[in-house]
Image (cartoon, coloured by chain):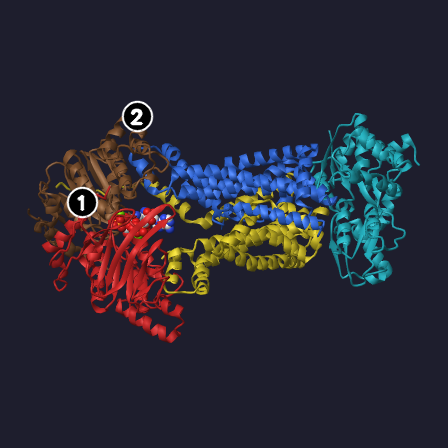
Chain colours: A brown, B red, C yellow, D cyan, E blue
Amino acid sequence: MTVNALAKEDFDPASVVTHDPVVRVEAISKHYGSVEALRSIDLQFERGKLTTLLGPSGCGKTTLLKIIAGLVPATSGQIVVNGRAVTGPGPERAFVFQDFALMPWATVLRNVGFGLELKGMAAAERNRIARRYIEEVGLQGFEDKYPHELSGGMRQRVGIARAFAVNADVLLLDEPFSAVDEQNRRKFQEDLLRLVEMERKTFIFVTHSIEEAVYVSDRIVLLSPRPGRVSNIIDPRIDRTANPDDIRRDPGYLDVVEEIWQGLRHYAE
Amino acid sequence: MTVNALAKEDFDPASVVTHDPVVRVEAISKHYGSVEALRSIDLQFERGKLTTLLGPSGCGKTTLLKIIAGLVPATSGQIVVNGRAVTGPGPERAFVFQDFALMPWATVLRNVGFGLELKGMAAAERNRIARRYIEEVGLQGFEDKYPHELSGGMRQRVGIARAFAVNADVLLLDEPFSAVDEQNRRKFQEDLLRLVEMERKTFIFVTHSIEEAVYVSDRIVLLSPRPGRVSNIIDPRIDRTANPDDIRRDPGYLDVVEEIWQGLRHYAE
Amino acid sequence: MSVMSQDVKVVAPAATTREALRLFAERRRSFWVVLSLAVLFTTWEIAGRIPISFAFPTFLDTLAAFFEMVGDGTMIRAFFLTLQPLVLGVAVSALLGITLGIVMGLSDRVEWLLAPVFIVLQAAPMAALVPLVTFVYGIGLVAKTLAVIMLALPVIVLNSYKAVRHVNPSLVDMCRSFQGTRRQQIFKIIIPDASPVLFAGLRLGVAAGFIGVMLAELLITPTGIGDLITYHRSVANYAHMYAAVAAIIAASTVTLALLQWFETNVMRPEKRRS
Amino acid sequence: PMRVAFGDIATVETLGLLIAMERAKEQGVEIETTFLKSEDIAAQAVVSGQADIGIGGPYALLQKVKAPIRIFLQLSELQMYPVVNTEFYDEWADLDGQEIAVHSRGSGTEAIMQMMADKHGIKYSSVAYVPGAEVRTGALLQGNVKATIVDSSGKRVLEAEAPDKFAFLPLDGVEATDEAMFANTDYLAQNPEDVAKLVEAVVTTWREIAADPTVVAKLREQYNLLPDATPEMLAEIEPYYSGMKDALPMNGGGEEAARSDFAFYTASGALEGNPEELKVEDFWDLTALNGVLGKIGTQ
Amino acid sequence: MTLFGYRIPMMASLIVWALIWEIVGQLDVIFLIPPMSAIIAAGFDLVQTNSWQNATLVTIRSFVIGMALAIGIGVPLGVMMGRVKIIDNIFGLWVNIFVSAPLSALVPVLMILFGMGEATIVVTVFLFAVWIIVLDARAGVMQVPASLVDMARSYGASQATIMRKIILVSALPEILAGIRIGVIRGVKGVVIGQILVAVIGYGELFELYSRSFDMERFWALTMVLFAAAMVLSAIVENAEKRIEYYAGAR
Ligand SMILES: Nc1ncnc2c1ncn2[C@@H]1O[C@H](COP(=O)(O)OP(=O)(O)OP(=O)(O)O)[C@@H](O)[C@H]1O
Ligand SMILES: Nc1ncnc2c1ncn2[C@@H]1O[C@H](COP(=O)(O)OP(=O)(O)OP(=O)(O)O)[C@@H](O)[C@H]1O
Ligand SMILES: [Mg+2]
Ligand SMILES: [Mg+2]
């Protein structure tokens, strides 16, 4: 377990070698009117890995994720996914929203199948697929419930199932667990690790929780406060074969948490 | 550092010996209409100690705290504070609300002095006292600000100062830090420990966070899901003299967290 | 890592102009206000000149009639007469309505007894009842004030009642936990916390009061602005009649806008979410 | 069709005219009636071309309006009774400095009260406008109005309900149009036959009623007018028309009526100018009436 | 309220008021208030008269046409205002003025523009109802969670699809709430129009009964109208509740 933490000043993004960059973020800057949200971000994301964006509130994590998703246009720079430049949302990327973004008037089944419905897939086919993913996230039996009948944790699983159902290569998750209570959150983190393991997809994940980031990530990108820039990249290299509880008390794990905590502490009020 | 964890089945609340029970919860049950929220709770709380109520969402933590505060009547059983049975709110108990419960139209000074104002204390006297506690929670200079001009963390400090200002023996805190972001939360926990140290008061604290509970508590009461019953009582006995960062990586600390996590995990969905 | 796109997007000048226009259109509300007023008045003027009816004056005639009436004092006197029942009625409704509303909010029994009555009164077409007032209270100020009250009171009562019912319960709990008395609870917590909504109810009451006073002046006896409208109609001074109608609508709009301004800038309901 | 706008709702008082219209219909005139809230709305309907014929007393309007409107038939003469509550007043002089109520600004009722004030050298403190003689009657009975002017049915109600409570003040030498029919000159020029048939129907009906007021009730049944009238309303018919007998012009008014109107309305202030200099043809179109009178003779 | 442990529904207090009314009426305190029983009897008489049936027909027709226009124009306009800033800028001022303006003063002008008959009543109903419908539809659209729209976009939905499948459905509770208030205002509009303008429909009946001091029928008619307003709003409210049920805790 080695920590690849580079001091801020001599950090050079170009030097970070990646093997199979599915997503390339190239010199992305973003201004909202006079607010500079992001300043020339360069990043690469590999297949089968989970990368976390971590940084103080307002540093542009959501903005970057939405630019990758094609939901927000960048002011300059470009996003390349699977070798093609992004101009808008595409079927190879799926977004999981912090507030779940479930349609309150639709059943779990319809919510999960919504991405397919928009593609024009026939009802029978899309329900079949939706059912499969509902099962995969452990919600079988809840197909005909409405979102308000579910707990926060269950709602987010619907959101994740919906993202999986369209079979995208890249999953973009914006603080997916922040509305879920602490105790369920741990379970989720383990579920997420299992999903990363099972599906060979690229996960880009945003969180506020240092522990969560260290626990689930293959790589952590630290962003500086506004305007957001990459301030550090850390590879926790945690041995996933160990028992989750052992991981959480492993000194290596705790060192990384501590290091990030020290790095971010001066941003707190 | 010893952990006093009793197995659920042979746990007998009467056997827990306490030295100076300021608050005694005796056979408290509570029904909301047909919903049974609490079932025969027996507990004792000692002076100068911080006891945490921990349990899954909806298990009745808030309800129990409000019964102790005299804000909600119990269906059966009684609360005894300093030897006298509780029939309603009293001057020896003060409540800190999860949503702060600050009066938006009043300045910090008036909010902090509000408990004294209601007692009919003269303005000069109560402002003097309020100022002292404002200083104690580190808000000097903000006396004339309004709640909406403060951050979440600062608002909660106003709530705490208000509770201290009436000089109650017992402080009841319902998830006081849940609306505060992760990074400020740690600071708060340390502040709270300092306050427990300084004032010889009885703290009853509710939280969802296992780490927080273990970090700040002298004793942790685990409640089972609805109807809430006492399922376990744990005394973390952590050495508070150590450096906070060291505490958080102390194996004893981690063991307690782990144990509670195992106890609660099957309640998570 | 290949840094291959340092290129800043080159935007065509045409697009920038269009963008600038769009931004202008979106930002400058006042521009649209002026433009839509201009369009309205021009259409009015043209329609009046065709004319679409002998009874339809042009905008300029109406404007002239307005200044004439302001100049010779009739307009001011008319407003003076119209505002009397309005101010009286709104004041009575405010006092009575806020009190009733608060009592309804505080007491389940009073709520049970009164809420349905006011719900019915608010939903019902009270205009039908206005002429009845004459039978009991004659034709003077009292009758008109009563008409204003009939329209304004239910709105104010129901809003005050809602305001009290929606007082932040944890503030009430807070007051109780410090052993506040019921009196302290009402005067130190409930009323201050409800005051933005109480005020909003008052504003709606004023709007309803304007409707009430116009109904009274058109249905009971013509006085004030209502008299200007009926009299000038009966002698075919349609421009004057239009001017009177426009004046009362403008007056109510300005009054309500001022109240709204007061509400958002002084009561600051948005800042109350602590 | 001929679109007629009434300045009032259909009640017992309009029965006579409704009967006359039924008769005109029998003569092949297509008539559409609308009942409007007040006279000035009826006048406005004619001005703006939404009705062909209006009913009311629109002298002030005739002088001001840009559209060419003419009266072609007088329907009734003012038959009004100034009345006071005897608890407070007994004669005209008592009304000096007091409040009175009349029908509306510029109306005949106001004119009468104003003329009597001039005649008795008094001045009212204020004049309230209370449209509807019934409303003023009601207000008198309720005690909300102490001095006003009512019509003949109001007089009867007052005499029946509270015989000693009210006094009717003397009124002499007032002759003026209460209600008349008026129309756009274009309409009159283009539809002379229809208008003539209507005028003839009204004048003959009026003569019939004047001869025997009970005929109204019979004709109501015959033509099935006011089908939902309550018994109280029906009981009103006979006394009302008996009382109206003298107020119904037998010859449709005409030049003579116009002249006395000029005198009356200039005095009241509704018309401007010297009554001698006002021209009848600026206010009246006598073509139809003269034609009809030529046919059926005058009485 | 609960009495002896039973919950008494709130609207039940209206029965108490009706009883008080009956007593006051029986005591013959004032001719304005005849006994409730006499009013109800008059009501049964009333609905059998031709004039009531005709007036009802006319009234319903004006109301339905006016409301249909108000909904048909108000909802799309509100939705557009919620979606397009420029349209919002253009119409925002007017909608806000007219939603609380004393429209009763405008009725005399409407007569000039729309004639003496039903058209004016229809326009009155429309003007009374439309603004609140626009405002509520706009509010509904504005508070569609941005993340739902983003979600649909991220799955490649077209603008039309987003409008149909997300925005309209999501704004439906507010749209219905606007329609409910619009219906109540529309009933007020039809009455005010009929009383102020042309004396047709219920306006004529009100005028007739109040002039002939026929208080029983007057109140019977009033209660029919009040009941109609309440029933209409209850129907829309019911629809609203069902939507809210699906919309759940938004
Ligand atoms: N639509 C917008 N218009 C204007 N400014 C915006 C907009 N969206 C975001 N911003 C600004 O851009 C900056 C970055 O916002 P962003 O939401 O990406 O931050 P974040 O890192 O996701 O924050 P958080 O941790 O609070 O979610 C913030 O300062 C924010 O105020
Ligand atoms: N006023 C009330 N009326 C009816 N049921 C209530 C009321 N307050 C609480 N309950 C119910 O009582 C149970 C306990 O609620 P309580 O708020 O005490 O739980 P909690 O442990 O504080 O939950 P959380 O962790 O979500 O704050 C819940 O099932 C809740 O639904
Ligand atoms: Mg974010
Ligand atoms: Mg709680």
Q: Is residue A122 visible?
A: no
* E208 left or right of E11 in image: right
Q: Is residue C182 above or below residue A162?
A: below
- Is residue D147 shown above or below E91? below
**Front-lying residue, A11 or C161:** C161
Image x and y of residue A103, in percent: 34, 37
Q: What amino acid is at disc 2?
A: Met
Is residue D209 in view from this perspective?
yes
Residue C129 placement (x, y as % from top left) = 65, 47
Location of residue C141 (image quadrant): bottom right
| Front one among A233 and C270 | C270
Q: Nearer the viewer, residue C76 or D235?
A: D235
CA separation in Å, label 1 and label 2: 33 Å
Reply above or below: D2 against E134: above
The label shown at residue A52 is: 1
Above or below: residue D6 compared with residue B13: above
Q: Chain of mark 1?
A: A
Q: Residue tagged by mark 2?
A: A121
Q: Which of the 4 image quarters holds residue B169?
A: bottom left
For mark 1, give the secondary structure: strand
Please check whether the numbered discs 1 and 2 fall on a single chain: yes
Instruction: Assign a secondary structure to mark 2.
Output: loop
Identify the residue at image location x=56%, y=48%. Answer: E13
Question: How many residues crowd around disc 2 within 10 Å: few (fewer than 14), some, or many (20 or more)?
Answer: some
Chain-order first, disc 1 or disc 2: 1
